[in-house]
Image: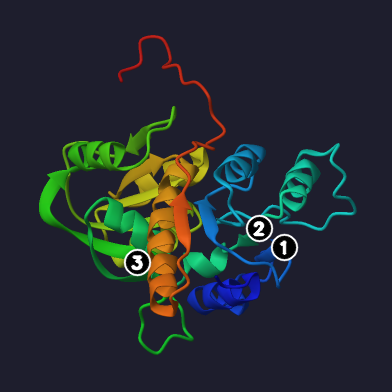
C-alpha cells in the first residue's frame, strides 16, 4: 500500500504542477504525506456531494479537476461551504489533490478524453505548447471524423456520448453543413475562437459559450458551434485519469482501488425551452 506522497509523485509526473497557468491553484489541498492510500475517487468538482461520496466509499484520496480554492482565502471555517468540505475531508482522513490547467494541456489531457468520448481521430493540439518538442501537448485538440456528418448529426453524437445534463447541447450554425474536422476543448472555450478559425475546422465543440463571442464567431466564419455543459465536457477526463492511475498502480504493485464518481455536479437543475421555440 503506497503512501500519499508516493501517489502524489506519480500524479505530478502525469500532470506536472509547473505546467499549470500562473493564476491556477493545483496540487494537494489537504492530506498527510505519510498516510497510506488504498482507495481513490476521481471527480470534476470538489463539492460537498463528492466529499460525502468519498466518505461512504471509504476513499483515502480524492482527485478533482477543478480547484477547491482558486483564489486566496483567510478561513477554512465550516460555516462556509468550502471550509465544510475541508472539515469533512480532514475528519475522515481523506486527502484532496487537484489537476486543473496542468491536466488540460497534458498528453493525454482533458481534450484527448473529450475527443475519445466521441470517437474522434486526434490530429494535434489546437494551441500547441511551445515547450513540447514532440508537438503533442497543448490546449484543445484538432480532430477528424471517420465519416462526415451534418452539424446536426454531430451535435446529436455529442449529446449521446457525453454525460447527460439538463442543459444538453446547444448548436449554432447551418445544421445541414458537413462536418469533417472538429476542434474540441474541454471546459470554457470561447477564448479560443482565433485559433479555431486559424485551424480551418468545420465545427468547434466546447462549453460555456457566451452570446457575443459566439455571435461574432458565426458571423466571422462558417464554423458550427456545439456548446455542451462545462461539467460534461470535462468528466471523460476522470475515466482517462483513473485508467492512468490504475496502470501506475499495477506497475508498482500498489493494489489501489480506483473509482470514478458518477455524481452529476453540473450546477443546473432544470431547463425549459422558450415558448414556441424549436427543440
Q: SS class of the residue under badge 3?
A: helix
- Few, some or many residues within 10 Å of mark 1 (<14, 14–19, 20+): some
Give me the C-alpha separation between circle 1 and circle 2: 7 Å
**Front: mark 1 or 3:** 1
Q: Mark 1 touching mark 2, by CB under 8 A?
A: yes
Residue matched to label 2: 96
Q: CA distance from mark 2 to mark 3?
A: 39 Å
Decide which of 22, 54 is in the foreground and name it.
Answer: 54
Eye-nearest disc, 2 or 3: 2
Instruction: Assign the N terminus to one quadrant of the image.
Output: bottom right
Q: Which residue is mark 3?
A: 198
Tell me if residue 131 comes above or below residue 225 in the rendering. below
Query: Which one is nearer the viewer's eye here, 15 or 84?
Result: 84
Relative to the observer, which residue lies in front, 202 or 141?
Answer: 141
- Quarter occupied by residue 218: top left
Residue 51 falls left or right of residue 224:
right
Which residue corresponds to the image point at 71% horizontal and 56% vertical from the top-left?
Answer: 70
Identify the secondary structure beneath mark 2: strand
Whole-percent x and y of residue 274?
A: 43, 15
Quarter of the image for the C terminus: give it: top left
Percent coordinates x, y for residue 201 in the rendering = 26, 59
Callout in the foreground (1, 2) = 1
- Considering only order in the chain, which callout, 2 or 1, is on the residue closer to the N terminus? 1
Where is residue 235 shown, x and y percent of the image?
A: 44, 49
Q: Earlier in the sequence, mark 2 or mark 3?
A: 2
Q: Secondary structure at mark 1?
A: loop
Which disc number belongs to residue 31? 1
Q: Residue furthest top?
A: 275
CB atoms of marks 2 and 3 within 8 Å:
no
Expressed as whole percent of the image width and height from the top left, the position of residue 134 reads 35, 86
The answer to which of 248 and 161 lies nearer the viewer is 248
**Nearer the N terminus, badge 1 or badge 3?**
1
Amino acid at each position: 500500500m503506497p503512501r500519499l506522497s508516493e501517489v502524489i509523485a506519480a500524479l505530478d509526473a502525469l500532470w506536472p504542477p509547473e505546467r499549470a497557468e500562473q493564476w491556477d491553484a493545483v496540487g494537494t489541498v489537504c492530506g498527510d504525506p505519510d498516510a497510506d492510500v488504498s482507495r481513490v475517487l476521481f471527480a470534476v468538482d470538489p463539492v460537498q456531494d463528492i466529499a460525502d461520496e468519498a466518505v461512504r466509499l471509504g476513499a483515502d484520496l480524492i482527485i478533482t479537476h477543478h480547484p477547491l480554492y482558486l483564489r486566496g482565502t483567510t478561513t477554512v471555517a465550516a460555516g462556509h461551504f468550502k471550509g465544510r468540505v475541508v472539515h469533512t475531508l480532514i475528519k475522515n482522513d481523506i486527502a484532496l489533490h487537484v489537476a486543473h490547467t496542468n491536466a488540460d494541456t497534458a498528453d493525454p489531457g482533458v481534450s484527448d478524453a473529450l475527443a475519445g468520448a466521441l470517437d474522434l481521430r486526434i490530429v494535434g493540439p489546437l494551441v500547441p505548447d511551445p515547450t513540447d518538442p514532440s508537438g503533442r501537448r497543448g490546449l484543445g485538440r484538432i480532430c477528424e471524423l471517420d465519416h462526415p456528418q451534418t452539424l446536426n448529426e454531430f451535435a446529436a453524437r455529442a449529446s449521446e456520448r457525453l454525460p447527460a445534463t439538463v442543459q444538453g447541447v446547444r448548436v449554432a450554425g447551418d445544421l445541414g453543413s458537413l462536418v469533417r474536422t472538429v476542434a474540441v476543448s474541454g471546459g470554457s472555450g470561447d477564448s479560443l475562437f482565433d485559433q479555431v478559425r486559424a485551424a480551418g475546422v468545420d465545427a468547434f465543440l466546447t462549453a460555456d459559450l457566451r452570446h457575443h463571442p459566439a455571435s461574432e464567431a458565426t458571423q466571422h466564419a462558417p464554423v458550427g458551434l456545439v456548446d455542451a455543459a462545462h461539467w460534461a465536457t470535462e468528466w471523460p477526463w476522470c475515466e482517462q485519469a483513473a485508467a492512468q492511475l490504475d496502470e501506475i498502480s499495477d506497475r508498482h504493485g500498489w493494489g489501489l482501488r480506483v473509482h470514478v464518481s458518477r455524481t452529476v455536479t453540473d450546477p443546473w437543475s432544470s431547463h425549459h425551452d422558450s415558448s414556441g421555440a424549436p427543440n
